[in-house]
Amino acid sequence: MSEGYVLPRTGSANDPVRLAILVSGGGSGLAALLRYQQTPRCHRTVLVLADKVDVGGLLHGREASVKSIGVPLPMEIEKDDRREAHERLVNAELEAADVELVVLSGYMRIFSPWFVKRWKGRLVNIHPSLLPDFPGAHAHRDALAAGVSVTGCTVHLVNEGVDSGPILAQREIEVLSGDNEEALQERVKMMEHTLYPEVLDRLCSGQISL
Ligand code: GAR
């Protein structure tokens, strides 16, 4: 399971691990992380990156005076080569900012094996279900359709599969009888906003080993 994973170095409040947070949408999780980091922690966000130029997440980054950039898909490149070309652009930004840990927070793209290999162990994701149940882009819809009574969220290291890397932490929540996708999503997000900072504290202070 631990093959090829290189975990981040141990950070401290004086020398925090340098994070990039990647988003595709409104970024409520990103905003929660930036709020958490207002107190010195063993990790600090140095870059917010979105796969579009006009998403709300970028505003949260800018409000916190963190470099915040949109890196859209290079549409001028032929479709077959576009994903890799995009990942190379993203990777160049991460390297230029001396990023040490990539934190996916509602980033809705799947990385290629090339990118995963480059960051393996230093690429972490939060997913709104109790993995391995309900991977993919519609976790809440799938959980409701399956009629489960408990769902939750998972923080995991990213591997070459979809939502299938080593699990670092999970938190459960009851599905209520009147729940629809939106209501469930909001309640799960509230849990995510406390779980992700806790896991990043552990990951960036040497408390996680594979
Ligand atoms: C979060 O619930 C996150 O777990 C989910 O997107 C939401 C982003 O919300 N991620 C995925 O579904 C990844 N497959 P936010 O933009 O308000 O932070």
Image: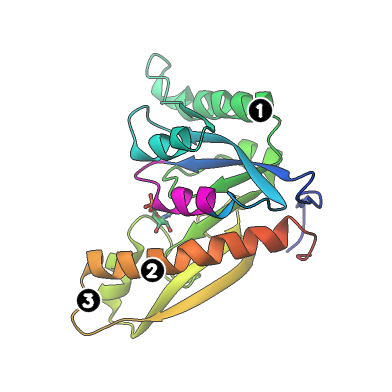
Helix, strand or loop: magenta stretch = helix
Marks 2 and 1 sit apart, C-alpha to C-alpha, by: 31 Å
Q: Which residue is mark 1?
A: 97
Q: Nearer the viewer, residue 14 or 105?
A: 14
For the point 31% across and 65% down, the residue is: 186
Q: Decide if ligand 1 comes within 8 Å of the CB at mark 2.
A: yes
Which of the 4 image quarters holds residue 145? Answer: bottom left
- Residue type, label 1: Ala
Where residue 188 is drawn, which disc sits there? 2
- Residue type, label 2: Val
For the point 32% across and 59% down, the residue is: 138
Marks 2 and 3 sit apart, C-alpha to C-alpha, by: 12 Å
- Relative side of 28 to 93, left or right: left
In magenta, the rendered stretch is: 24-35
Q: Residues within 10 Å of mark 2 (few under 14, many from 20)?
A: many
* Mark sitting earlier along the chain (2/1): 1
Where's the C terminus, which quadrant? bottom right
Q: Residues within 10 Å of mark 3 (few under 14, many from 20)?
A: few
Q: Which residue is mark 3?
A: 179
Marks 3 and 1 sit apart, C-alpha to C-alpha, by: 42 Å
Write down which quadrant ligand 1 falls in: bottom left
- Relative side of 123 to 140, left or right: right
Residue 13 screen position, x and y as percent:
75, 50
Residue 52 screen position, x and y as percent:
37, 30
- Relative side of 91 to 65, left or right: right
Name the element at disc 2: helix
For the point 46% across and 79% down, the residue is: 172
Q: Nearer the viewer, residue 137 or 151?
A: 151
Q: Would you say residue 122 is visible in this rendering?
A: no
Q: Decide if ligand 1 comes within 8 Å of the CB at mark 1.
A: no
Q: Which tag is nearer the camera, tag 3 or tag 1?
A: 1
